[in-house]
Image (cartoon, rainbow, N blue to C red):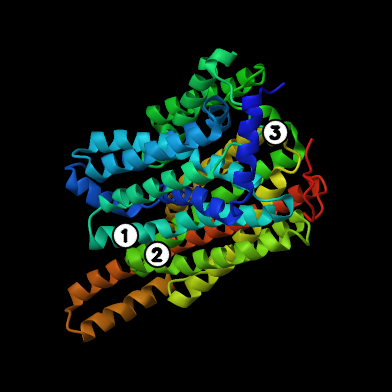
Amino acid sequence: MPTALETEVVDVRTPARSVINPWVIAGTVMLATFMEVLDTSVANVALPHIAGSLSSSVDEATWVLTAYLVANAIVLPLSGWFSTWFGRKRFYMGCVMLFTASSAMCGLAPSLPILILCRVLQGLGGGALQPVSQAILRETFPREKQGIAMAVYGMGVVFAPVVGPTLGGWITDNYTWRWIFLINVPVGVCSLLLTSLLIFDPPYLFRKTLRDGLKIDYIGLGLLATGLGALEIMLDDGQKHDWFSSRGIVAAAVVAAIGLIGVVVWELRQKEPVVDFRLLKDRTFAISTASMFILGFVLYGSTMALPLFLQTLLGYTAMQSGLALSPGGLMIMVMMPIVGLLLSKIQARWLIMVGLVVSSLGLFEMSHFDMQIDFGHAVSARVVQSLGLAFLFVPINTVAFSFIAREKTGYATGLINLARNMGGSSGIAICTTLIARREQFHQQRLIEHLSPLDPAYQSALAGMKQMLMTNGANSTQAAAQAQGMIYNNMQQQAAMLSFNEVFWILGALFIAVIPLMFLMKKIGPAKGPVAMEH
């Protein structure tokens, strides 16, 4: 039975919270979350500047990215457990505070080791912001507006990685790389003030402390941190060190396998796990989590591959390639609220299937790119892909929690956000490897035709030699230059074919996910306040 004081506290808090507009709460929780997701990609284009400023190599500077992603991945699945320990609001504010303070330290870091350490702290502080903000949004909006809530969340976590490289390049070119971290400080302070005034823990979220018998699962925490950290390092550094020909990558893979298998086995035997893998017993949540992994894989893989194609083969600057992606990001922002409204009229799985087909069409269009495409062609293909992505993120996040108990929302959001982040890391690593390996394969096949016995090669060589001689080169110089030009063209064609194949694979991956939608439990459009929960 609650005491008189407890009753009074509940009676005071409930009316105060009920008068707060849910859109104000949505803006509050997404403020810091947007900046956190932005920081996963905003530093990418600034690495050469960071390396030069701190007297290090670009390879050493890549640890600025890796350190953040490793710390981020470790904290993501633990957000539900930490919310139970500290209280959700207190934990969220603590994360914002750590993220803001470490961002300031990153901007002021005098050396690379200190910057990497600050990025670890920034990743630890920022990792939980995504799942906690998603849980708050789900509780703030009634069931019939869950699609809109997830649209708000999606605009933050999908749009931010797209605009990150463009924004980072603009800040670095016009100011200094330190400002890509320092701009987080005023946003973080504003988020802290608004959170303290507007956000409250739900009445069903019971906080447990060590005095109440809450036990810290050191073995589970250790296995999770070790496994995810090793996996992230393996994915980030694999291609750089030629994957399993490197002892370090083999060691990371073994540690990751032991840690991740071990944490699943261990946590399934615990009464109060730090990560509740039992949630994956629900078929709909498990399929949604797998779909979110594929979504992260394709989103981050294509977001890496398209600018790389434009810059390396078509000569675009970092800013120009970023501008080619920006219309796609705007399409996502425009369409997500519309998709959120459609969820009240159409079953989520049908919307997901539409998104998979449309997005794959955009990727298949990219698989037909050649060296003559113009800016508009690249933009239009990306816009079609992004149109499909808008139909994926909101319905998947909405349907995932349909049969998850409210008190387990924090654990569930941690798992599904981890799936998206690890999918993104895997997508970047595997697409990078495929581009490099397939380029080598196509180069070996094409070079077979650069033979004195090949009539087409001899004809092209003679024509190019004649053109160079017409422009003033002598016969010897023209012959050497013509061979060099043809070889360079062959390398470009090999690279183009490798990019085409990667885009085709990403599109086919989305098509392969469609049959999974028929395995989901049937969930009707959200039209009322009654939640579908077990």
Vertical relation: 256 (above or below) 426: above
Circle 2 packing at 10 Å, graded few (<14), some (14-19), many (20+), is many
Closer to the N terminus: mark 2 or mark 3?
A: 3
Q: Secondary structure at mark 2?
A: helix
- Gap in Å between the C-alphas at discs 2 and 3? 37 Å
Residue 338: x and y in percent read 65, 65
Q: Nearer the viewer, residue 419 or 145?
A: 145
Q: Amino acid at mark 3?
A: Leu
Q: Are marks 2 and 1 in contact (CB under 8 Å)?
A: yes
On screen, residue 192 versus residue 103, left or right, reads right
Residue 488: x and y in percent read 33, 65
- Gap in Å between the C-alphas at discs 1 and 3? 40 Å
Q: Secondary structure at mark 3?
A: helix
Q: Is residue 528 visible?
A: yes
Circle 1 packing at 10 Å, graded few (<14), some (14-19), many (20+), is many
Q: Nearer the viewer, residue 246 or 62?
A: 62
| x 40%, y 51%: residue | 41
Residue 169, disc: 1
On screen, residue 127 versus residue 363, left or right, reads left
Position of the C terminus, as image quadrant, is top right
Closer to the N terminus: mark 2 or mark 1?
A: 1
- Gap in Å between the C-alphas at discs 2 and 1? 9 Å
Q: Amino acid at mark 2?
A: Gly
Vertical relation: 319 (above or below) 462: above
Q: Are marks 1 and 3 in contact (CB under 8 Å)?
A: no
Residue 280, disc: 3
Circle 2 residue: 322
Q: Amino acid at mark 1?
A: Gly
| x 60%, y 27%: residue | 275
